[in-house]
Image: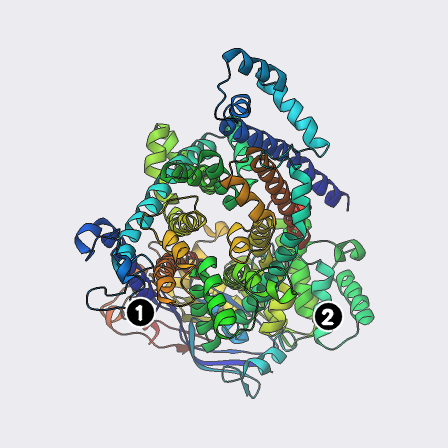
Amino acid sequence: MKKFLFYCALTILIAFIFIGIFADLIAPMDPDAINMANSLASPSAEHLLGTDHLGRDLLSRLIYGSRSSVFIAFFATGCTLLLGLTIGLVSGYFGGWADQLIQGVVNIFQGIPSTAFVVAVLGLLGPGIKSLLIAIVVSSWARFSRVVRNQVLGIREMHYIEGARAMGGSNLYIIRRHVLPNILLPLLVLIATRIGSTVLTVAAMSFLGLGLRAPASDWGIMINDAKLYFVNDFRVLLAPATCLTLFCLSINLIADYLRDHLDNDADTARIL
Amino acid sequence: MNDTLRYIMTKIFLAIPILIGITLLAFGLGLIARGDPALARLTVDPDYIPTEEEVQALREEMGLTDPIFIQYGRWISGVVKGDLGESYLDDKPVLSEMLRLLPNTLLLSFMSLTLIVVLGLLGGILLVVFQDRLFDVIGRILSIFIMSVPGFCLAYFMIWVFAQKLKLLPTSGTEPMTAFIMPCLALALSSACLVARLLRSSILGELVQDYALTARAKGLRKSQLVFRHTLRNALTPSVTHIANVFGGFLGGSMITESIFSIPGIGTYALTAINNRDYTAIQGYVLFTGFAFVLVCLLSDLICSYLNPQIRLGRRV
Amino acid sequence: MDIRVEDLYVRFATLSGDIEAVNHVDLTFSQDQITGLIGESGSGKSVLGLTIMGLLQSNATVEGRIFLGERELISLSEKDLCAIRGREIALVAQNPATSLNPSQKVGRQIEEVFRLAGEGKVDSTRRTHELLERMGFSDSERVMHSYPFELSGGMCQRILTAIAVAAHPRWIIADEPTKGLDAVVRNQVYDTFCMVKEQYNVSLIVITHDLLLARKFCDQIVVLYSGRVLEINTAQAIFNNPRHPYTQGLIASLPHLGMRPMPGFSAAFTDQPSGCVFHPRCPYIDEDCRKIEPKLIPVEEGSVRCHRYS
């Protein structure tokens, strides 16, 4: 059952990624083609999901929307991961004053709730995709590095690290061969949840008009556009909201499965 | 008792550098973003082009040529006195403006907090009690689904159902009190589900601990075991999570407040950002940071109450 | 009241396959004797103890029957089992350091047993004091207000024993009571159990891999290996005249008898050998041992599961 849900979720996620990559080929129409004569049209053979208030094809906009959401989410998470991982590894593996200093900075960055942080950075840098990326990385690297550091601290004490060091392994070698593989699984859970929350943040910021700007195709912008029209035609809101929910659901299911998997290993070890 | 007191003092003491760091961060962000206020002020009138001397004179008058730490010192001494500066937009003091809007945000935050605590704890405990039965399975699927619905989608969905179709609740504003129901649900529901799931898994984690075996061997039933022994130990992660969420709420939830037109801290920040009102943004960062750190401090103290190992100076 | 185990079979479903932890065990624990269950880690001895109390996790499948006097325990409802646990059969869990609730004061954890038995608050507190003093704590007031992590391993062990005897059960199952304790504390534990046995008139099942404790303390000894009973005999006979090759190996590995290690390792649970489970490590291996599983054969006052005695 759990496994089945996990594979469903994985399929959905991969489907989103593919749709995002090949948006040009899949989308039946130009997402920005305005046709005021055909605004808010119901689904038909020509427009499978109908059109929005400017007569743009809803399905095509959704498809291009998944491109921007998926792209930004993966890219931002990748950057955060790189930054957080490096800092966390240095902090946890080498310890000492570097650790103290880094933890101080991490504490300060963690002292501001992430949404407020993103909004503030966006407000100061001005809206746009670049500032959005910067805002997300700046506001979330701290948590990442904290998790990595705590994992590394636990592993550093293990005997096999001592053994590797005794055998003359260099720091870089030990990190690559022993530390990284062992923090990978917990990290995977964090990455998954991070991608989910990044998609949400992007959508929320676009919705507030601080992220991507209209007329770009983005789920957040589509929801923002829909807020004046959904009273008459709920479809224009439901479409992007469903995509967003589906994406988050698949991420949550994947993270949940990974977490269970981690726990189960521990459980089996406990019985034996 | 002495240990407890020492623990609390240490925690408070440790929060001070973080708070100072946040003032630095807020000041730095403002510094990076504001550009040159002197130039900005002189070019308010588009027809007038100021000379370089005029700009320089005003810079000196505004203290912009001083070293940065002196500027910071001047700013922080104002902050300590409760002066966060005046908004560029309407020259109203930032702090009093935020304090004026605070009650709405506070009301919304506390209502949401109550909902999260009640629903989250109740849900988590029920899921454990009915573990692996129909209620548990349905509850888990439902909760992961609700968790995945973004707050603003939920908000519009509720507006559509309860305000447009059923005409039960007002869509916006702060009067009457029922207007707070939908914003509160939109804010709290997904966190409540998350807390329920978190609590469930941490209680289940406690149930396989050695001490739970001793307790069961005394003849305790499962519900007694959960309430008397495991719940307390399992609460720590949930408390930390709730504190994180609540700390965020105190900083104003921009999306919910703007959807439901509630004048609060969030909408204030949003207006400030849209108008590039840097003093206000600076004040906002400072305010949310302080609120957040204080809430987290409180949650640390609650956790240390729940788990005496923390406060009595032993590593868990 | 004897505890009689008939054809008990316990299986755990895990991710890495099913694990047969207890394999068709027939045993009688008679009430006037102290029975020791000995075996290596993973021989199923702890699982057997927990099965008697119905305390296994939900991924376990239990078949067979366990009688406490006339009552059959496996078919009892959880509610009826709760009435038996603590009051008729009590447990002293292994790992004293982690077997007490870390966030509750020790006093309350003992009082809870009295409260469950229906006593009032004042009485419970008073009896907890008495109990602690009887357990050899001179400053019972301070101990009651301590958290478990403020006490030493040996003290926690005595607290656990106090919890077990509090409701005057007929049976106490002690799971590895000396595990991880140093020699002095081990002796204390031994003294405590002797005192408990005398003063409370309980019957005991001691699960241990501490052979010396078993010899000193037990009347009858059951040797378990891979979830099967290999030999049952009086403590004296087991140590003076071990019959099963495995028992012989165990005794020979004792420090004062030369500390000769046994060759090989216990079989993996998921991949058990055919025939006699011990045959891959047995020095007297025969053709039959590989194919036919031996039965438990009565020999003099004990019984042994080995083809050499048929």
**Quarter holding residue C169:** bottom right
Circles 2 and 1 in contact, beta carbons < 8 Å: no
Say left or right for A271 vs B223: left
Judging from the image, what secondary structure is the residue with disc 2 in? helix
Res C66 seen here: yes
Judging from the image, what secondary structure is the residue with disc 1 in? loop
Measured along the vertical axis of the image, is residue C19 above or below residue B93? below
Residue B78's x, y, as percent? 69, 29
Please tell me which residue lies in front, A214 or B198.
Answer: A214
Q: Give the amino acid at mark 1.
A: Cys
Residue at mark 2: C199
Please tell me which residue lies in front, C238 or A239.
Answer: A239
Please tell me which residue lies in front, A27 or A16.
Answer: A27
Instruction: Tell me which colouring the rendered structure shows.
Output: rainbow
Say left or right for B101 vs C230: right
Say left or right for A160 vs C220: left
Q: Quadrant of the C terminus of chain A?
A: bottom left
Residue at mark 1: C276
Residue C296's x, y, as percent? 38, 77
